[in-house]
Image (tube, rainbow, N blue to C red):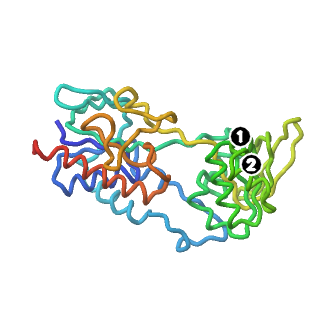
């Protein structure tokens, strides 16, 4: 029986685990990998590493410590979490059952993909999934944003404040009718390609061309220095569906202490309904979740 099991090896999960170790809890991190989204870094021909605040240094310190402390990690995906007799049972993909008094869910999200030729080849080489993280690198650059919802709207708006030009592919619906959408429609450095879809990504080492198709089926090519796929984020919350409260997007609902609707279950990072999908935000949320879990466990320690 563990005091705490942390599920997820990204920034939030790594931070939560290290904080729990420092509190002398009997803790186990369960994840398919260590590092999460920090394992992916956008490469651009004009950008040096010192120009980017990644949060990677902080995460790498925690990851290095856990790589050394083998007793505190178990590298395997988790299938589901359910109530147990004295706490909770974590079921792993291989059929294992791990018992714990408390759980921190830090499983992050997965990005909806385009599933078109060239996407896999150029991922993180001029093509990425977070304008919120990388927009400052595109001052006076030509960019493409792909998506039709609020995520694409915010991304296009943020890029429009710094980029030379933004092509918004697939824009439409309620996003365009919003005040921000109307502002972008009137902006001189934004082209709205309503109803268009991407059919291919091309380039030479880096993504440089986006082939799009209009509603009538005619293809054309956009040339850009950065392309952002902003279709939607899908929370990896299925393992606790029915155990804790989720919002309409299947994100785990948490309060300011990282509590979920179920006592003993805490959540942190992108899988929750907290603000901003950022590494440093996830690090802070992971620390908060671990401290809250410690406070929950303290009477029985």
* Residue visible at 34% across and 52% down in the picture: 286
Label 2 environment density (alpha carbons within 10 Å; few <14, some 14–19, many ≥20) = many
Instruction: Say the numbered circle drawn on residue 116.
Output: 1
Image position of 178 (left or right of 29): right
Looking at the image, how many numbered discs can be counted on the residues?
Answer: 2
The kind of secondary structure element at disc 2 is strand
Q: Distance between the residues labelled 1 and 2?
A: 7 Å
Q: Where is residue 214 in the image (x, y as percent from the top left)?
A: 85, 40
Q: Please, is residue 82 above or below residue 201 in the view?
A: above
Is label 1 in contact with label 2 (beta carbons under 8 Å)?
yes
Res. 125 image quadrant: bottom right
Tell me residue 244's x, y (percent): 35, 32
Q: Which residue is drawn at 49% across and 53% down?
A: 276
Q: Is residue 2 visible?
A: yes
Residues 129 and 277: in front is 277
SS of the residue under disc 1: loop
108 vs 64, left or right, is right
Image quarter of residue 15 = bottom left
Q: Which of marks 1 and 2 is nearer the N terminus?
A: 1
> Quadrant where the N terminus lies?
top left
Spot occupied by residue 211 in the image (x, y as percentages of width and height): 80, 47
The percent position of residue 138, horizontal first and vertical second, equals 67, 66
Which mark is drawn over residue 210? none
- Mark 2 — residue? 201
Viewed as shown, does residue 229 lie left or right of 266? right
């Amino acid at each position: 029986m563990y005091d705490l099991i942390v599920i997820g090896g990204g920034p939030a999960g790594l931070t939560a685990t290290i904080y729990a170790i420092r509190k002398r809890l009997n803790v186990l991190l369960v994840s398919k990998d260590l590092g999460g989204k920090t394992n992916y870094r956008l490469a651009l021909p004009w950008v040096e590493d010192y120009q980017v605040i990644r949060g990677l240094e902080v995460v790498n310190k925690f990851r290095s410590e856990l790589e050394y402390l083998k007793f505190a990690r178990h590298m395997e995906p988790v299938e589901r979490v359910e109530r147990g007799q004295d706490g909770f049972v974590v079921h792993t993909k291989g059929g294992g059952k791990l018992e714990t008094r408390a759980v921190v869910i830090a499983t992050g999200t997965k990005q909806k993909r385009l599933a078109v030729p060239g996407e896999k080849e150029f991922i993180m080489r001029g093509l990425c999934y977070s304008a919120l993280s990388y927009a400052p690198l595109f001052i006076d650059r030509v960019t493409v944003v792909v998506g039709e919802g609020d995520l694409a709207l915010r991304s296009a708006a943020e890029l429009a404040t710094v980029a030379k030009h933004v092509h918004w592919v697939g824009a439409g619906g309620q996003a365009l009718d919003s005040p921000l959408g109307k502002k972008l429609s009137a902006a001189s450095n934004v082209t709205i390609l309503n109803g268009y879809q991407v059919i291919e990504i091309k380039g030479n080492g880096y993504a440089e061309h986006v082939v799009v198709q209009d509603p009538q089926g005619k293809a054309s090519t956009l040339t850009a220095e950065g392309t952002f796929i902003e279709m939607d984020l899908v929370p990896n919350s299925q393992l606790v569906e029915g155990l804790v409260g989720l919002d309409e997007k299947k994100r785990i609902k948490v309060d300011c202490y990282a509590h979920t609707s179920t006592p003993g279950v805490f959540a942190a990072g992108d899988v929750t309904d907290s603000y901003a999908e950022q590494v440093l935000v996830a690090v802070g949320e992971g620390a908060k979740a671990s401290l809250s879990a410690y406070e929950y466990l303290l009477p029985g320690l």
